[in-house]
């Protein structure tokens, strides 16, 4: 499956570890955009990724431009509470990159502005819901991408 998952400046190592594990399970590539709120050498990321972490297809990039230069995504889908369309409205193509901001601040403002038409959200009908945990949000988007990409395969 041709799918990248991109975390922009992730802050919580447990979430990144869980997303890494998800990537191994789906055969997706994980891209992390600096700055990171933790050390990749730390035990917290590896503990969350469990014995999967050594199998993560991982790339770390200094900034967004460096990611684009190396990865050349064919499609960009941004998961954000600022999205106006449901993630179920995405039409995922091979070579897609699912992009997520960090746990505390989301995406950088320039990405919100530049990619305003590529923002999608998870519906949250609960009356007190603001957002889901980052790794849970990534999983919802990633499994929808997997469903779409394997239906066409």
Image: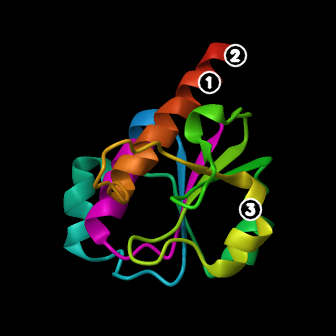
Residue in the picture at 36% in, 60% down? 130
Residue in the picture at 50% in, 71% down? 106
Q: Residues within 10 Å of mark 2 (few under 14, many from 20)?
A: few
The answer to if 50 sits in the magenta stretch is: no
Residue identifier under label 2? 152
The answer to if 16 sits in the magenta stretch is: yes
Helix, strand or loop at mark 1: helix
Residue in the picture at 26% in, 62% down? 46
Q: Is residue 109 above or below residue 60?
A: below
**Horizontal arrangement in the rendering, residue 74 relative to residue 76 (left or right):** right
Nearer to me, 116 or 143: 116
Residue identifier under label 1? 148
Residue identifier under label 3? 116
- Residue 151 x, y percent position in the rendering: 63, 15
The CA distance from mark 1 to mark 3 is 23 Å
Q: Are marks 1 and 2 in contact (CB under 8 Å)?
A: yes
């Amino acid at each position: 499956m041709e799918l990248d998952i991109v975390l922009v400046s992730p802050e919580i190592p447990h979430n990144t570890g869980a997303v890494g594990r998800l990537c191994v399970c789906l055969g997706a590539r994980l891209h992390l955009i600096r700055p990171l709120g933790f050390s990749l050498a730390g035990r917290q990321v590896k503990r969350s990724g469990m014995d999967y972490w050594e199998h993560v297809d991982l790339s770390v990039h200094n900034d967004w431009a460096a990611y684009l230069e190396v990865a050349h995504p064919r499609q960009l889908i941004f998961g954000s509470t600022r999205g106006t369309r449901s993630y179920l409205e995405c039409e995922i193509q091979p070579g897609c990159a699912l992009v997520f901001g960090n746990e505390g601040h989301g995406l950088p403002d320039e990405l919100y502005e530049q990619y305003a038409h590529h923002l999608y959200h998870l519906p949250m009908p609960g009356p007190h819901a603001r957002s889901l945990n980052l790794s849970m949000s990534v999983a919802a988007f990633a499994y929808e991408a997997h469903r779409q990409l394997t239906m066409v395969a």
